[in-house]
Image (cartoon, rainbow, N blue to C red):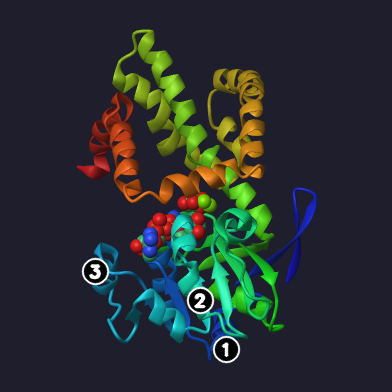
Amino acid sequence: MAQMNFGGVMENVVTREEFPLEKAREVLKNETIAVIGYGVQGPGQSLNLRDNGFNVIVGQRQGKTYEKAVADGWVPGETLFSIEEACKRATIIQVLLSDAAQIACWPTIKQYLTPGKALYFSHGFAITYKERTGIVPPADVDVIMVAPKGSGTSLRTMFLEGRGLNSSYAIFQDATGRAFERVIALGIGVGSGYLFETTFKREVYSDLTGERGTLMGAIQGLLLAQYETLREHGHTPSEAFNETVEELTQSLMPLFAQKGMDWMYANCSTTAQRGALDWMGPFHDATKPVFEKLYKSVADGEEAQRSIDSNSQPDYREKLNEELRQLRESEMWQTGAVVRKLRPENN
Ligand SMILES: NC(=O)C1=CN([C@@H]2O[C@H](COP(=O)(O)OP(=O)(O)OC[C@H]3O[C@@H](n4cnc5c(N)ncnc54)[C@H](O)[C@@H]3O)[C@@H](O)[C@H]2O)C=CC1
Ligand SMILES: CC(=O)[C@](C)(O)C(=O)O
Ligand SMILES: [Mg+2]
Ligand SMILES: [Mg+2]
């Protein structure tokens, strides 16, 4: 494990150079890894593990996602099973069910957590909010986490492009003395770029904050506020969308992704630089209290409870889809659909 300096703070990280794929295969050569759930993370992690040469099976309930697993080459009775059968065969149970489904399936999973097995999560949710989830593993299994910092869809596409999505890792319980080598080998196996150390609690607090904040919730709120302001002052949808979203994702975001914010600024006009440097403060100050409120709601368990309550309802998927439909059909994103079509590379 390497210690690296991140902006003046030392952290433990594990890179692929230190822990190559061959070593990961050696560590897990006698293990059967069962990926339970085939939603978004399930396909990404299981297909990457399979392509990397690990002994992996999938456990998925019947239905549309089961058919997707078959279409992806998992063979019923050989590498594709019911959740129960996969847990029985596994030495490592990789729980990639939705957080709410983990609660529903816990009685099944728990039965097969015999001594020496490993229980793996990609989120700190189940363990951290155990008073709400009821998920308390027996003491004689390893409890580990690899949390890819991005969508399972990106985990797979980046793997196929020869890249890697960064993941955090944590050990909650080391019953076998092998938890560290197991968790790192799995992290490398699922296609992580590098792995950084965390705890279950820090992972779930930061993850829930991030996705509600800048990554998903705040970004839509911020973009919409600017789009509306421009529209209300007589600007056309084309102009408002280009100045709010298209320029950001197509031109400016790639610049700061590659070389940092100062580099993006430096490649814009001096007029833009002056204005951005003046206005970053007010935007920071306006949103900081919202982030504080959000973090508190995460730490109090309110966000977790809301997720459990809403996602346990039988029609949760239809309700989510309906809200996504409204987003898709909003003027801003309808404009986006046309703008995307007009990109020369899409013609
Ligand atoms: N979506 C993502 O890319 C990311 C997800 N995670 C974490 O990974 C885990 C899995 O998340 P997703 O892949 O998004 O899950 P998902 O919401 O796509 O669902 C996964 C699976 O749960 C199954 N399922 C749902 N309800 C069930 C029930 N009552 N009984 C049996 N199976 C049921 C579905 O059939 C599906 O195969 C979660 O802990 C999540 O927080 C972590 C990083 C990113
Ligand atoms: C993709 C990811 O890491 C998220 C946003 O935290 C999630 O899907 O839960
Ligand atoms: Mg996340
Ligand atoms: Mg998340």
User: For the residue labelled by badge 2, is the local secondary structure a helix, a strand or a loop?
Assistant: strand
Camera-side mark, 2 or 1:
2
- How packed is label 1: few (under 14 Cα within 10 Å), some, or many (20 or more)? few
Quickly name the residue at label 1: 26
Rendered-image quadrant of the C terminus: top left
Please provide percent x and percent y for residue 192: 54, 66
Please provide percent x and percent y for residue 19: 63, 77
Quickly name the residue at label 2: 93
Give the amino acid at mark 2.
Ile
Rendered-image quadrant of the N terminus: bottom right
Q: Is residue 278 above or below residue 211?
A: above
Q: Nearer the viewer, residue 80 or 311?
A: 311
Q: Earlier in the sequence, mark 3 or mark 2?
A: 3
Marks 2/1: CA–CA distance = 19 Å
User: For the residue labelled by badge 1, is the local secondary structure a helix, a strand or a loop?
Assistant: helix
Please provide percent x and percent y for residue 52: 45, 79
Q: Is residue 299 above or below residue 290?
A: below
Q: Is residue 242 above or below residue 155?
A: above
Q: Nearer the viewer, residue 303 or 55?
A: 303
Q: Earlier in the sequence, mark 2 or mark 1?
A: 1
Q: Earlier in the sequence, mark 1 or mark 3?
A: 1
Q: Quadrant of residue 237?
A: top left
Q: Answer yes or no: is residue 215 visible.
A: yes
Quickly name the residue at label 3: 67
Q: Nearer the viewer, residue 141 or 271?
A: 141
Give the amino acid at mark 1.
Glu
Which residue is depicted at the point 68% across and 53% down?
202
Marks 3/2: CA–CA distance = 21 Å
Q: Is residue 155 above or below residue 220?
A: below
Which residue is depicted at the point 51% across and 78% down?
111
Which residue is depicted at the point 28% across and 81% down?
75
